[in-house]
Image (tube, grey):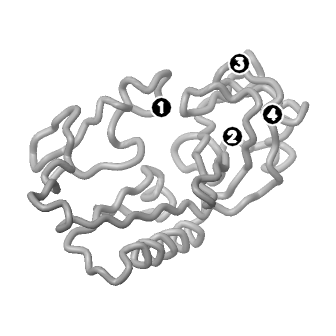
Amino acid sequence: MPVSGGASVGEFPFETYEKLQAGFQYCNEMLETDSLSLLFLKARDPKMVRFGCSYESSWGPVAPPVICTKAEKNLVIEVDQTPILEYLKTYLGEGFADHIFFARPKFSFIARLKDQGEEKSLIRVPFALNSERQGVDFWPPEDMQGQKIQLVQLSRNDLLCGAENAARSLKESLKGYHPEIIFRFDCTVRSTILHIQGK
């Protein structure tokens, strides 16, 4: 059964969504593209299928939210009229690049979105330092001008707490029904933070 989540469905980071949306998925020993892996859930009687879902990020805020006041598409140069590199030095110190980019990120950014009364976190990943433009490239490749983002810490305890809250919320959404199958989608940074390889 092909199950995938986060950036694992394509190439990351990338300048466009095209390769991410290609949807590379493993099904046993075969790699498929653009497969609709949930079609097998289609039942003859729709009443026989019930769904519940849950989502949590639970990253702990490090600083107040800021507005991207100068950005060129996904390259952010200033936040709240402050050069973003100075901003990062203020909160993370001179060696901020060691804690925010690539292999073992300890900090990232999120944007918040209200969805049917619930607040969701949208990941805004700083993935490259642009020394020439004195800015930071963010992923997904969206226009960051005017976006409100917040610096957050990626901690083991927060991740585990978020997973527990997601499981509890999922159980409540099923309203007493016992699921026969559960899909779990993880961010690709999970194993980095937990220092384990999971399946």
Residue under label 3, please give it.
72
Q: Secondary structure at mark 1?
A: loop
Q: Is residue 19 above or below residue 79?
A: above
- Relative to residue 163, is residue 184 drawn left or right? left
Q: Looking at the picture, which amino acid does disc 1 mark?
A: Pro
Tag nearer the camera, 2 or 3: 3
Q: Looking at the picture, which amino acid does disc 2 mark?
A: Ala
Q: Secondary structure at mark 2?
A: helix
Find residue 46 and report its horizontal and vertical position in percent. 18, 60
Q: Earlier in the sequence, mark 1 or mark 3?
A: 1
Q: Earlier in the sequence, mark 1 or mark 4?
A: 1
- Relative to residue 118, is residue 179 drawn left or right? left
Find residue 190 and report its horizontal and vertical position in percent. 45, 58
Residue under label 1, please give it.
13
Per the model, the C-alpha gap separating discs 2 and 1 is: 17 Å
Tag nearer the camera, 1 or 3: 3
Dot 3, how many residues are within 10 Å of its Cα: few (below 14), some (14-19), or many (20+)?
some
Residue under label 4, please give it.
84
Q: Residue at x 44, y 78 (%)?
A: 172
Q: Residue at x 64, y 49 (%)?
A: 113
- Would you say the residues marked 2 and 1 are in contact, meaning their CB atoms lie under 8 Å apart? no
